[in-house]
Image (tube, coloured by chain):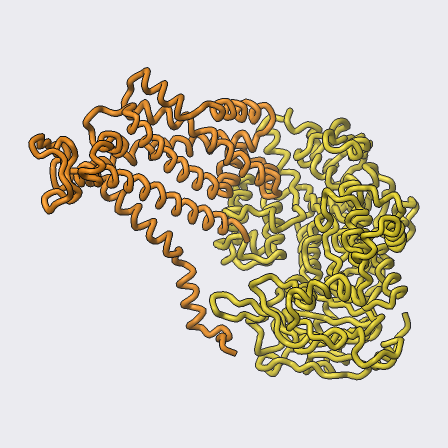
Chain colours: A yellow, B orange
Amino acid sequence: MTVQDAGVAVVAPVTVPDSAGVLRVDELGVSRVRHGVREPIVSGVGFELRPGETIGIVGESGSGKSLTAKSLIGLLPSNLQASGHVSFGGESLLDAGEARMRSIRGSVVSMVLQDPFTMLHPLHRVGQTIAESLPKTVRRDRARLRSEITLRLAEVGLDADVARLRTFELSGGMRQRVGIAAALAKDPAMLIADEPTTALDASVQREVLDLLAELQRARGMSLLLITHDLHVAFGVCDRIMVLYAGTMMELGPAEQLRSDPRHPYTRALIRATPPITHVLERFDSIEGQVPALSDVAEQCAFAARCAFAVEACRTARSPLVSVGDGHSVACIRQELVRSSLDMAPEGSGSFSLTPIETGGQVVARVAGLTKTFRGGSRATSARPALARVDFVIEPGESVGLVGGTGSGKSTIARCMMGLTTPDGGTIEIDGVDVSDFARLTAACRREVYRSVQMVFQDPYASLNPALTIGATLAEALGVRESGDVDVEGLLEQVGLPAAYQNRRPQALSGGERQRVAIARALAVKPRLLICDEPVAALDVSVQAQILELLRERQEALGMSMLFITHDLAVVRQMTSRLLVCHRGSIVESGATGAVLDEPQHPYTRALREAVA
Amino acid sequence: MSIPMDTSTAARSTRWRRSLPPVSVIVAILIAAVFIVVAFFGDLIAPLDPDLQNLLMGATAPSADHLLGTDHLGRDVFSRVIVATGPALAGPFVVALTTVVLGASLGLIAGFRGGRIDTIISRAADLIWSLPGLLVAIVVIGVIQGGIWLTVVVVAFLSIPNAIRQTRSATLSQAGLPYVAAATTLGLSNARVMFRHVLPNVRATVLATGMLDFVNAILIFAALAFLRIGVVPGESNWGLMLAEGQSLIWTNPAVIVAPALAIVAVAASITIIGDWAYDRASAEGER
């Protein structure tokens, strides 16, 4: 898309009566009322969405982006309250009664939800799901109903046969398409899409986004896209609003935000996403974490993490001021920020990761690994999860393992950790044959677990909620029995204050929990650290901190790393050698840079193209 | 705006209020506390000798001398209810303790280990579960003619399957979480992973099961005593008092109302406390 003048008349492609089809949001606030105390979560959000326009609301978790969207169509949880003004086509939505809202939802404003795996009725067939959302007149006429369903499925790129299938027979991407078809069944004037692609594989993500953009264009519908990923928003949206701790940081045309972001937070967000084309020497992470709005009500919400903050930022809220072309920003220092921050990518390709020379025997050798999961439905048991996987990890080497959902990459890790027993093949860790952990003696198993450790994906479930951080780490240290580092030393290694040892996991943020999980794994000084999607559950700004930490620790300790991820940009930053896993086999391997720049296998090429 | 915007005093007062349990639970705790004190010091509290008979007086209505009147043998009902509290709670308490320790351990092992061990434990639990509990208790205790400790053993045996099932299903929901995998891959022993990592996270279930077993046992003990099974004729016992006092319902209703109320009050208050404790313990486990 070209940079366009974002003046009122230009963005609205058709001349329409003053307010027809226009969503106006003014001074929108959401607050939680608990025991008579009102605690603000979102405040001062205002924008206008015209017919045929796409606005992206971008923010990290806790920024209030989902609540903002839900408040527009009266779907807030009962303990939350919306305030301010929201109108669609001149009709106020916040004051509308529940009966009126019910008729507005679906037919005027519709919504697509994040998780395609839980949003469809598990017992209904696809046809039923769509029929349920169609207008009554169509539903009563059987012949018309069938042709209408076929039409609706075709619109989202699905065959007519799909109507007979049940939810569990569909892939994630197909489910999301069905969800979109159902949301559009009453031909709404506006669609709200809440993280529609977050739960999907990278290659499918692109398709669903393209589909949304195409439908929006064809129907002249307005689209409100909520996402945590600025780059997704850049690809689809006309205008983008950046939310942080429930307040608007910046609002402007997508192209301008990409080329000339004015708010330090927007800049930091753009730079926090690692590039796929080259390796960064240092990550631009944003230190700290998102505050609660109630703690920053009288100041700039970003001040605590901002390098440009001055006293004035901490004593008063920065007003949203226009910087021209429909671009406005809430930063009193924006002139200075603009002149002093260079947005050009740095050091393109000069830096590269090389294995650390430590010598010694091979850390891990996997040969002919096979695994088929029995039970479950016939469809899944037909295909083996792993079909002859071979690879070797040298000392000090960082190896990446990429692949989509169901490619078997996590199964490989679980087999290496003895959490799943493979059907065939051998796994050797540090010279010990661990193909079947059940056959090892207890002492031998303990010995193996001093050589290999794992960092799990979900930091919210990988720490025992009943134990303090100190107890968790002390237990791990007890396994090693070396005594040269204590709990405080471990916490320091992962950048956490010593006082954290008395806390329990629920008092920590996701990034902090992942730091603790890494500390636990490092406590035994493993020769090999397996990281299974260690940053997939984290916000962009925190992601970079964890990646930086892992890279720094790997170098300092000279250990090998097996880094499992679906994210090609991340794997470029973290590894020197890359294995591409598809349908249970390694389809391509080689130096990370070479594989990503010149993919040979069709699957790798498809993966690579989905990102570019 | 009528609602204050987070003034510090309001916040403090709500925090204070939140740390207190709801009124119903406070009342339940007070009632339970009274019963526990009475259970321990019943002999000292009772105003009269519960076994002192006065056959000439017979059953009388409540009076200044006898707060709840007398029964058909002229014994003081108030003293008898008080003295009966200890035995009425001691047996069920031992039952609850046994089921929690044995049932929770077996359930934990079954849920965590899975496979053949799970099958053996679970099927055994199903087998006991399928027995008609009260009937088995009546037959066994009636035939063997044992006292309170035989009743404890039989009731505990019959209550264990519930504890096993509850703990097993709570364990299953935890066993798949990564923190358990992380503990396992540190090379810790199964026993350590089970008792140090999983048990604290299923404690809400274990606690609630124990409380409910306690209440259940109180009712079974009373029911058996009412049928004069496992009790010595003439002893102070709520269930037995109910049975013996039936004919006096018009002369002195307190003879049956007082022990009945005692049973209901204990059972209800412990159920309410158990409910609240479960909610609190499981809320703590969440984020």
Where is residue B2? Give x, y as percent.
49, 77
- Can residue B26 be seen here? The reply is yes
Quadrant of residue B171 in the image? Answer: top right
Q: How many marks?
A: 0
Image point (43%, 65%), residue name: B14
Image point (69%, 43%), residue name: A530
Q: Nearer the viewer, residue A429 or A103?
A: A103
- Can residue A402 be seen here? The reply is no
Where is residue B147? Give x, y as percent.
27, 23
In the picture, which quadrant includes the C terminus of chain A? bottom right
Q: Is residue B270 positioned above or below A138 on the image? A: above
Q: Nearer the viewer, residue B226 or B208?
A: B226
Quadrant of residue A231 in the image? Answer: bottom right
Q: Is residue B31 left or right of residue A490?
A: left
Quadrant of residue A190 in the image? Answer: bottom right
Image point (75%, 55%), residue name: A198
Q: Nearer the viewer, residue B137 or A540?
A: B137
In the picture, which quadrant includes the N terminus of chain A? bottom right
Q: Is residue A241 positioned above or below B169 on the image? A: below
Furthest residue toward left: B56
Q: Is residue A339 left or right of residue A79?
A: right
Where is residue A183? Give x, y as percent.
78, 58
Furthest residue toward front: B250
Image point (74%, 27%), residue name: A423
Furthest residue toward top: B143
Q: Is residue B14 left or right of residue A247?
A: left
Where is residue A181? Give x, y as percent.
82, 55
Q: Nearer the viewer, residue B194 or A594?
A: B194
Q: Is residue A64 positioned above or below A421 on the image? A: below
Q: Is residue A276 left or right of residue B220?
A: right
